[in-house]
Image (cartoon, rainbow, N blue to C red):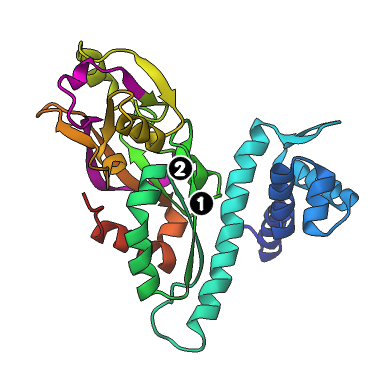
């Protein structure tokens, strides 16, 4: 029979292996600052205190978390896996405090207050989010949105959520990589692609193709390969806004998603690509823990209620 003392001893041992909030803050600071000394300066503690905390965290986790060198410190693969959850845990500490302060002494529903970190790709940030945030802050004046534009390449906006740098990401869904494990997602809209070209051009399909790196995701590649009229891109631009400007100047044609063509000028024409046109799915991505918070729940409600103006 296990005694109460033995149970307490096992529980105490398990607690000793848990990283403290300060150790989590230091891991994140080292990863963000790129070294022990700048992390200490950012946190207002000594370099030796940072080094001691990192060694303690490594001992508890049984892995080396940072590669140390003359140029600073960079997370190892184990460190990368530790820093993302560390950021998310620290964010939950912040939200806990904000919710308690927002609730006051009453027993009513939880109030959505405090900063709300949103990652979005350019066209979503420009054409989808403004109306959403206008309604959100009108209904919840205690929320302070913080929007960062992230290129939808590689990890993209979902990667920002997974790394703990965003509470919610506006992301393209349905690609070959899928949503990272452990995250929740929801569909907001299906976005069709269209041909855009200079107004008045007699044969727009004969024009050079303008493109940008984010444009051809795995959801459009099969359609793209089947179109023998589409030439290789002769001009690559930084983003969809630059492509649209170059089309407007008569430099070529482009195949662009609907959000990118919101408020397109009269100097361009938008042509439907037919019933087999490609589409991409736009949705939100967040964590299970953050999905339960009042601020993220309020944002999701407004996202579902708002559609961009064509």
Residue at 73% in and 34% down: 74
Q: Is residue 193 above or below residue 291?
A: above
Q: Quadrant of residue 66?
A: top right
Q: Looking at this view, is 288 or 230 the one in front?
A: 230
- Residue 83, x across and y down, in percent: 64, 44
Q: Earlier in the sequence, mark 1 or mark 2?
A: 2
- Residue 128, x across and y down, in percent: 32, 52
The circle on residue 157 is 2
- Residue 91, x across and y down, in percent: 57, 59
Answer left or right for 135 relative to 278.
right
User: Secondary structure under badge 1?
Assistant: loop
Q: Quadrant of residue 134?
A: bottom left
- Dot 1: within a 10 Å radius of its alpha carbon, few (fewer than 14), some, or many (20 or more) residues? many
- Dot 2: within a 10 Å radius of its alpha carbon, few (fewer than 14), some, or many (20 or more) residues? many
Magenta residues (range): 181-210
Q: Is residue 89 above or below residue 281?
A: below
Answer left or right for 228 relative to 210.
left
User: Secondary structure under badge 2?
Assistant: helix
Q: Which residue is mark 1?
A: 166
- Asked whether the beta carbons under mark 1 and mark 2 sit within 8 Å of each other, the answer is yes
């Amino acid at each position: 029979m296990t005694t109460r003392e033995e149970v307490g001893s096992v529980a105490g041992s398990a607690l000793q292996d848990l990283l403290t909030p300060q150790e989590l803050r230091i891991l994140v600071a080292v990863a963000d600052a790129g070294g022990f000394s700048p992390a200490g300066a950012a946190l207002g503690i000594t370099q030796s205190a940072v080094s001691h905390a990192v060694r303690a965290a490594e001992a508890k986790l049984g892995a080396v978390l940072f590669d140390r060198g003359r140029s600073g410190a960079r997370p190892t693969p184990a460190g990368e896996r530790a820093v993302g959850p560390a950021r998310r845990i620290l964010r939950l500490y912040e939200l806990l405090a904000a919710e308690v302060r927002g609730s006051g002494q009453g027993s009513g529903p939880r109030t959505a207050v405090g900063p709300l970190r949103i990652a979005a790709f350019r066209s979503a940030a420009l054409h989808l989010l403004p109306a959403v945030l206008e309604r959100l802050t009108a209904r919840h004046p205690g929320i302070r949105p913080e929007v960062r534009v992230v290129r939808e390449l590689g990890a993209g906006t979902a990667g920002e959520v997974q790394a703990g740098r965003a509470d919610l990401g506006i992301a393209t869904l349905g690609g070959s990589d899928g949503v990272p494990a452990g995250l929740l997602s929801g569909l907001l809209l299906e976005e069709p692609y269209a041909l855009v070209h200079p107004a008045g051009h007699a044969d727009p399909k004969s024009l050079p193709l303008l493109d940008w790196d984010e444009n051809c995701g795995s959801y459009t590649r099969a359609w793209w390969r089947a179109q023998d009229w589409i030439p290789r891109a002769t001009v690559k631009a930084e983003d969809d806004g630059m492509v649209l400007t170059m089309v407007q100047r008569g430099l070529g044609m482009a195949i662009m998603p609907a959000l990118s063509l919101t408020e397109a000028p009269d100097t361009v024409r938008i042509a439907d690509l037919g019933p087999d046109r490609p589409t991409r799915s736009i949705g939100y991505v967040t964590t299970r823990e953050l999905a339960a918070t009042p601020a993220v729940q309020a944002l999701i409600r407004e996202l579902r209620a708002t559609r961009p103006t064509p």
